[in-house]
Image (cartoon, rainbow, N blue to C red):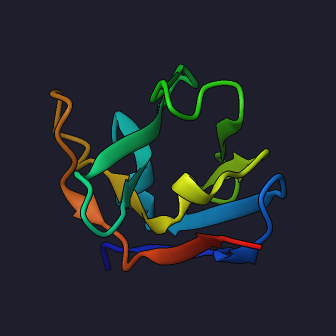
Amino acid sequence: QVQLVESGGGLVQPGGSLRLSCVASKSIFGGNRMGWYRLAPGKQRELVAAITKGGSTAYADSVKGRFTISRDNAKNTVYLQMNKLKPEDTAVYYCVGQDPLTTNNEYDYWGQGTQVTVSS
């Protein structure tokens, strides 16, 4: 079964930290890249971070230096460590993955999303 299952969202105060986890089915984890998108009310969807099968990473300017994406190949899991959180980081975060045959930057699979709220 092809799926992505996220966890780790919640409510945190500004300046705090959260770690999101995404367990992927084996076929998705074998794709060329995985990533995290976020969607906030009234804003455009944003690709926050991405990681390739080889471990190369890329980040949106809005999160550089604060967020870290990583992967554990033994657990078919991708993580998003979020530090120094700001109220503007509040959004639903989606784990995304590619089919192993996909070679462009488009993502074929989306998780159900996890809510992150940064508020005092």
Q: Is residue 49 visible?
A: yes
Image quadrant where residue 116 sits: bottom right
The residue under the point 84% across, 58% down is 16
Q: Which image quarter is the C terminus in?
A: bottom right
Q: Residue at x 22, y 49 (%)?
A: 99
Q: Is residue 113 left or right of residue 88?
A: left
Instruction: Using the image as rendered, state which of residue 33 and residue 45 is in the foreground.
Output: 45
Q: Residue at x 54, y 19 (%)?
A: 56
39 versus 119 height, above or below: above
- Above or below — where is 63 with respect to 73? above
In percent of width and height, residue 114 lies at: 50, 77
Which residue does the image show at 72% across and 49% down from the upper left? 81
Residue 34 place in picture, x, y as percent:
41, 44
Residue 6 in sight in this render: no
Residue 87: image quadrant is bottom right
Of the 4 image quadrants, the one containing the N terminus is: bottom left
- Asked if residue 20 is positioned above or below residue 45 in the image, the reply reads below
Residue found at the far right of this picture: 16
Rendered location of residue 75, percent (x, y): 68, 59
Q: Position of residue 105 (x, y in %)?
A: 20, 31
